Amino acid sequence: MSTSPTSTLASITLVKAWTAARDRLREAQVDSPVIDARLLVEAAVGVTRTELITDPYRPLSEGEAATLDAYVERRSRREPVSHILGRKGFWKIMVQVDARVLTPRPETEVIVDHALRAFTEGEQFSVLDLGVGSGALLLAILAERPAARGLGVDLSEDALAVARENAANLGLAGRMALLRGDWTAGLADAGFELVVANPPYIRTEELATLDPEVRDHEPHLALDGGEDGLRDYRVLAPEILRVLRPGGLFLVEVGADQAAEVSRLFHGAGAQAVGVLKDLCDKERVVTGRKKALGNL
């Protein structure tokens, strides 16, 4: 832990600690120094956002200051806030995350939003999450649809361990099964009303150019999409349609400039009503569509 005068946070108030943390993160070229500093102060001191605002002159104890100093030092080295705190909010749930899984992104919430629009609260349906990771996507859907059940598949046993713990913490383990596997290998035909996935889509040559938070701290297995970033979509397009029940819905996240090509892959595999959903930043984020319903010529 750094002990230089510029990094020492002892014997100061909440507002001064926040300001000092912000300045250190800004100097380290962190993208969101104000927000990250606030999150680290709240966690280190054990205060809420409201308390931070309404009681800004509360002094930090030596232990709190030391904890915050360590947090800020780690963030200055570009370790993600989610890894430092061990948790990340996603949709309406909080999940535990670490270096074994991708940190869930706000843009992925587009999948949750559309899934909840497609299935009513009391509707019984089965969800398959391919590449379940932390479980955030599947758990966010199950948390809001109490009659639904889900299966999460991942090649990484480490990721499955994180998802299993998150399911237990959220009281959803009884409605979510987990399976170690290579995408849909071994799954029966026509088993699910909904399939969601966030496959690796970064081009291999671009991995080295990613922000340090991603490049150095998140699993490359969940990032590397092959030479053109589309390797896994070629496998998934026909396989997702195979495991969907007739009329079933799929929602698959894509990277920048990939929506058109991924849409073509699903069209080629026989999907119907293929479309593209945009995220809150107006970027094409999710390819969606359905398996042909019975009797639909």
Image (cartoon, helix red, strand yellow):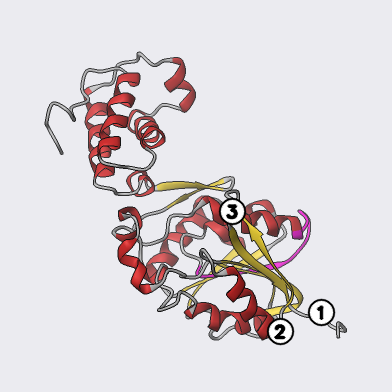
In the rendered structure, does residue 123 fall within the stretch colored magenta? yes
Q: Which residue is situated farthest in the left direction here?
A: 4
**Residue designated by label 1:** 293
Residue 270, disc: 2
Residue 138 in percent (x, y) is at 58, 61
Quarter of the image where the N terminus is located: top left
Q: Earlier in the sequence, mark 2 or mark 3?
A: 3
Residue 290 in percent (x, y) is at 73, 74
Residue 172 seen by the camera: no
Mark 3 lies on a secondary structure that is helix
**Residue designated by label 3:** 109
Q: Nearer the viewer, residue 175 or 98?
A: 98
Q: Residue at x 32, y 62 (%)?
A: 209
Q: Nearer the viewer, residue 215 or 177?
A: 215
Depth check, mark 2 against mark 3: the one in front is: 2
* Image quadrant assignment for residue 99: bottom left
* Image quadrant assignment for residue 102: bottom left
Q: With 160 as the anchor, is 278 left or right in this view?
A: right
In the image, is residue 36 above or below residue 233?
above
Q: With 189 as the anchor, is 208 left or right in this view?
A: left
Residue 39 in percent (x, y) is at 40, 35
Mark 2 lies on a secondary structure that is loop
